Image (cartoon, coloured by chain):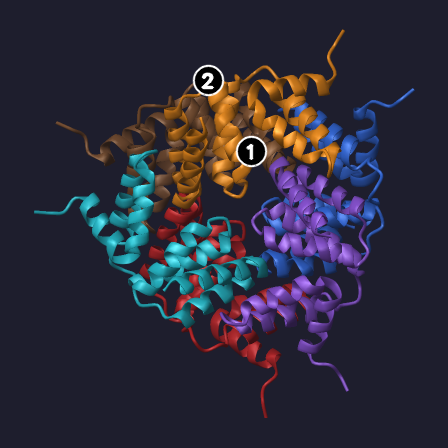
Chain colours: A cyan, B red, C orange, D brown, E blue, F purple
Amino acid sequence: MTQSRYETGLQKLNQIDGLAGTKVIESLQDICPDLAKFTIEFPFGDIYSRPGLDLKSREIATVAALTALGNCAPQLKVHLQAALNVGCTEDELKEVILQMAVYAGFPAALNGMLAFKEVLKRN
Amino acid sequence: MTQSRYETGLQKLNQIDGLAGTKVIESLQDICPDLAKFTIEFPFGDIYSRPGLDLKSREIATVAALTALGNCAPQLKVHLQAALNVGCTEDELKEVILQMAVYAGFPAALNGMLAFKEVLKRN
Amino acid sequence: MTQSRYETGLQKLNQIDGLAGTKVIESLQDICPDLAKFTIEFPFGDIYSRPGLDLKSREIATVAALTALGNCAPQLKVHLQAALNVGCTEDELKEVILQMAVYAGFPAALNGMLAFKEVLKRN
Amino acid sequence: MTQSRYETGLQKLNQIDGLAGTKVIESLQDICPDLAKFTIEFPFGDIYSRPGLDLKSREIATVAALTALGNCAPQLKVHLQAALNVGCTEDELKEVILQMAVYAGFPAALNGMLAFKEVLKRN
Amino acid sequence: MTQSRYETGLQKLNQIDGLAGTKVIESLQDICPDLAKFTIEFPFGDIYSRPGLDLKSREIATVAALTALGNCAPQLKVHLQAALNVGCTEDELKEVILQMAVYAGFPAALNGMLAFKEVLKRN
Amino acid sequence: MTQSRYETGLQKLNQIDGLAGTKVIESLQDICPDLAKFTIEFPFGDIYSRPGLDLKSREIATVAALTALGNCAPQLKVHLQAALNVGCTEDELKEVILQMAVYAGFPAALNGMLAFKEVLKRN
């Protein structure tokens, strides 16, 4: 019997984001549970569950994009922790953030690095 | 004797971007050669030459960021080719672009994928 | 006798934004009263006062844009309340925010939804 | 018997975007058919098919967001036509674009209006 | 007798943007003449006509912002020419664009510099 | 004997940003000292130290860009103070921020102005 997208997504979310993912999902329950459901189904059930790119590379891509966009600090912090969870090292993530100075400017890299500092302090 | 940042950067640029990198540098010579020089020295001499993250992961980060930002198609195409040059597979890059639908929306992913289609046609 | 743009705008601002609009205008008085004046005259006196699009649709457009841009949380909150003021339902606004996951990514939609949660808590 | 998300989405895409939607889907077939599939399933099968917001309001939200983001002209043109298809008038869409001068600046509004001019010329 | 905002704005637009400004205004006449009117009245009649900052500094600010935003090439070109019209030198403008590599990344600076190259070729 | 880029940059950073610059550099020491080093060397050692544009104009460009981007409030505040340090008047900076309403929308200008209000309160 095949898993539903929701079941696959929830399992993948737990594997990648751990407690932080659960908190995001919970924060949506009293305002828009369907957004929680879609977040589990599409990003985690459909995308992160695909073969073709390992989870470490997926998190490097996500950390790079969120650092560059620079307007979604909460999600960046969740994914910096997620990146550590799936095997990225601290030094690798610092390199990714640093590299964003080239593509999105120094403020984006600085704010990304200070977000990572907060994430590491919690651990 | 140590290499200058410029020499290190030029070598790294040639290794990663190949002909496309040379063209970017040439296009700047008659308008602002110092921007060409800085492009070689800082992104390539200082950043891409650092240990701590392999070139494949660096290009995944760059492709992710440029797809997500969505306002720099010429640089995205150069780095999609660069990513192939340093060992990313076509399928891996499609996964990176696809994943950006989650973080920057479907238009960003669609435009990134069509940029990749153009890059692959040239090869 | 015709109203000035300022008078028209102030009336429209009060109708749409209510107390929150007044607070924005007041917060500017000791730093740049001309920005307050322009905010009343152009957005509210010139644009929101135009026929051709009902106020509900105007606020849907604004909520969509501010959610998608993702870098102006204070203004998004003001306009989520404004949208309720002019007759949008909570469910309609949740749909608008949810839809932005498609065009600006899940982080933009998540942050927009949590901003709406704050707005609703105050009421 | 219930429709699959893909079937629901394809029907909704045809209803909203018409020929332009079909062309987007076709353009993806030889590079990443899964992105075509996800585009049908999530935006159109999951989101646009939801009750709670009429299609006219959904397209107003999309046109506003894409005009404000300002980096996805092809998708803006598709949705300007889609907005006309689902019952928005030319004047209503001009108002939405015009209003974006307030939230994303005059260049965004100007480029949105010129995109609309192109869309109207084709009809 | 005091000038209207429209008259003041039109005069300022002609002084700053010259022929390119006239073309922008004309391109809007058959799609949305009110956007042309607002463009003359608010940016040029209200803002650029204010004392407190010289026109050279105003154009430096505009060129910096449009280079950094990176999604409005037509307006950037108009204002690079406008900056030359009000007395900025080629070298000063190259410095402004170059500096944007720091705040918005190298792609923004590269695309800004190549836009300037096009503007200079026309002269 | 020529100064190193680091020495030139540190001197320029102190001249422009004063204490705020030192704090940024210090905040990076325990997470990524190399980002501190690059921030000194490239923006300050390479760019702000160039002839061809006076420091006042450089800060006007930076304030304009950071206000328009709207996603880097900490850096905007540092550079508003820096702009005052190198001779921009309060009124000139208000004009720059106000003008960004035209190019990046009223929310960007409002948030920029309120950031400036905070900077001025500290002095």
* Numbered disc 1: secondary structure: helix
Query: Callout 2: 10 Å neighbours few (<14), some, many (20+)?
Result: few
Q: Locate the N terminus of chain B by quadrant.
A: bottom right
* Numbered disc 2: secondary structure: loop
Chain to which mark 2 belongs: C
* Coordinates of residue C47 in the picture (x, y in percent): 63, 23
Tags 2 and 1 touching, CB below 8 Å? no
* Coordinates of residue D53 in the picture (x, y in percent): 37, 23
Q: Residue at x 70, y 24 (%)?
A: C41
The residue wearing badge 2 is C87
Q: Locate the C terminus of chain B by quadrant.
A: bottom left
Q: Amino acid at mark 2?
A: Gly
Q: Residue at x 66, y 35 (%)?
A: C27
Query: Callout 1: 10 Å neighbours few (<14), some, many (20+)?
Result: some
Residue reaching furthest front? F122
Q: Amino acid at mark 1?
A: Ala
Left or right relative to D101: residue B52? left
The residue wearing badge 1 is D115
* Coordinates of residue E21 in the picture (x, y in percent): 75, 36
Residue reaching furthest bottom? B1
Distance CA(mark 2)–CA(mark 1): 31 Å
